[in-house]
Amino acid sequence: MLDTGLAATEISFTSVIVAYAKAGRPKEAGKWLQRMLDSNVNPDTIACNAVLLAHANAGDAEGAFHLLRHFETRARDECPNAKPDECSYNTVISACARAGRPAQVEEAP
């Protein structure tokens, strides 16, 4: 869509991110979140949660924690529509469980 000059919306970006999340491909999901930001389309909580889900599905607890911290800072400073919610924190817990690191959950902000 972007390569053909069509305007992408929050929904179209989020759809691509969700597809990568389901496949457990956090690198690609994060790339699309960055493309969303670069296109001046502000993500909402759903888009950010989808990238967290990609990390959880890949068993990447460290990546999930890093993204959650970034997500919290960005919501506070720049993008209040992307505020972490219960789903965000539960997804980080899932990432820790899949990574076999349940004790790391206690480090959650």
Image (cartoon, rainbow, N blue to C red):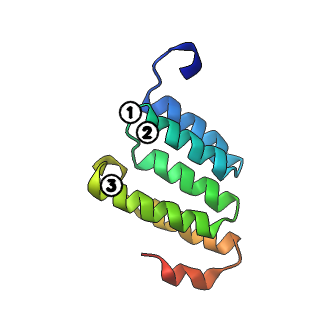
In the drawing, what numbered circle is on residue 40?
1
Q: Could you tell me if residue 55 is visible in this image? A: yes
Question: Residue 105's image quarter?
Answer: bottom right
Q: Mark 3 vs mark 2: which is more N-terminal?
A: 2
Mark 1 neighbour class, 10 Å CA radius: few under 14, some 14 to 19, many 20 or more: few
Q: Provide residue 17's location: percent of width, then percent of height.
A: 58, 41
As displayed, is residue 47 above or below residue 10? below
Which of the pair 39/43 is nearer the observer?
39
Q: Residue at x 28, y 58 (%)?
A: 76
Point out the frontmost of discs 3 and 1: 1
Whether residue 1 can be seen here: no
In which quadrant will I find the N terminus? top right
For this view, does 16 lie left or right of residue 5?
right
Q: Which residue is mark 2?
A: 37
Q: Are marks 2 and 1 in contact (CB under 8 Å)?
A: yes
Please state the horizontal and vertical placement of residue 62, each as a whole percent of the image: 60, 69
**Amino acid type shown at disc 2:** Leu
Instruction: Work out which quarter of the rendered image holds the C terminus and state it.
Output: bottom left
Secondary-structure class at tag 2: helix
Q: Which residue does the image show at 38% across and 33% down from the upper left?
A: 40
Q: CA distance from mark 2 to mark 1?
A: 5 Å
Q: Which mark is residue 95?
A: none
Q: Position of residue 108 (x, y in %)?
A: 47, 76
Residue at which label 3 appears: 75
Query: Most extreme residue toward the front, as rendered?
Result: 38
SS class, disc 3 = helix
Structural distance between the alpha carbons of marks 3 and 2: 13 Å
Disc 1 marks a residue whose amino acid type is Asn
Q: Secondary structure at mark 1?
A: loop
Distance between the alpha carbons at the discs numbered 3 and 1: 15 Å
Residue type marked 3: Ala
**Mark 3 crowdedness (10 Å alpha carbons): few <14, some 14-19, many ≥20:** some
